[in-house]
Amino acid sequence: MKLNEEDLIRRIRSDLLDSFDEELEMEVEDRAFTSAESPGVTDESSVARHHYFRELFRLQGELVKLQDWVVASGHKVVVLFEGRDAAGKGGAIKRITQRLNPRVCRVAALPAPNDRERTQWYFQRYIAHLPAAGEMVLFDRSWYNRAGVERVMGFCNDEQYEEFFRTVPEFEKMLVRSGIQVIKYWFSISDEEQNARFLGRIYDPLKQWKLSPMDLESRKRWEDYTVAKEVMLERTHIPEAPWWVVQAVDKKKARLNCIHHLLGQMAYEEIPHPPIVLPERVRRDDYERHPVPASMFVPEVY
């Protein structure tokens, strides 16, 4: 179904507003939305946004508890985020990591392999990013590049493609046997939604950097990517590391659903912490503070 001009403008505007919300999320505190509805709010979309923020902050609070449990228990977690370009993987990852300790929960977003890496065992460059005890690693795209973009764009041959499918189930089973929990998400969007999001990036100067020649090429090969996705899900959906499909046409709902589901994949519990007491500052009679030269200060333009 082709979008009419009015619907297209609406979707582009929604995408722009979403980028503003990304910044708002970093600044607004949970107490701003503690009531069921803010006084005087009648616009349906505003109420929906307030509900989204309330749920996001609540779930992020649970993620902090999960983080504490991962550290205390020495659990090891790998979460793979896959999906078409502009499916919302990065936005979901950002909301998961937003309030977590980057030393505990880190993101691995590997660039295209260099000449040396192309001669290695295919999985070799990913192994260095796997978690140690008490760590979570979120892969923004993963070894499944071979089943998707490499297959569609012709970056691997048929033999390499088939070898990947022979190896990846055993590779993931090996990770699980070693004590690493593997969780795999596929973010699913429609043809029309991807088109609208790409147009939003074209007209948003803050997002134009997200559009690459590969992204533009992927628009022409939508059906090839669909076939590749279907084969990938069928051949790599194993009990030890099953795929979970996130309906991602609505970005905000996708983020909340993904975080809620992720929390449900681990039997975490709240770890008690001793009360924190701020110590008194030690003052020394022989200490004298030296003034900072005025030339070193950043100009106060604002």
Image (cartoon, helix red, strand yellow):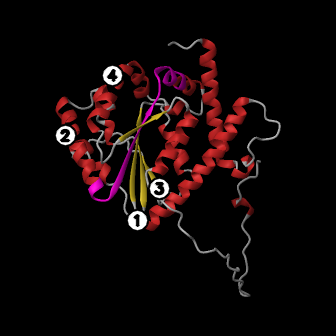
Q: From where the camera sits, is residue 30 visible?
A: yes
* Label 3, residues with CA under 10 Å away: few <14, some 14-19, many ≥20: many
* Pointer 1 residue: 74
Q: Residue at x 57, y 25 (%)?
A: 200
- From what the image shows, is residue 194 above or below residue 128? above
Mark number for residue 224? 4
Check disc 2 and report its element: helix, strand or loop: helix
Mark in the foreground, 4 or 2: 2
Q: Residue type at mark 3: give it.
A: Cys
Q: Residue type at mark 4: give it.
A: Asp
Q: CA distance from mark 4 to mark 2?
A: 21 Å
- From what the image shows, is residue 295 above or below residue 258? below
Q: Looking at the image, tell me whether mark 3 or mark 2 is earlier in sequence order.
A: 3
Q: Residue type at mark 2: give it.
A: Arg
At which x and y percent is residue 109?
Answer: 41, 45
Residue in the foreground of this view, choosing between 35 and 227: 35
Check disc 1 and report its element: helix, strand or loop: loop
Q: Looking at the image, tell me whether mark 4 or mark 3 is earlier in sequence order.
A: 3
Mark number for residue 105? 3
* Pointer 2 residue: 166
Q: Looking at the image, tell me whether mark 4 or mark 2 is earlier in sequence order.
A: 2
Residue in the foreground of this view, choosing between 184 and 285: 184
Mark in the foreground, 4 or 1: 1
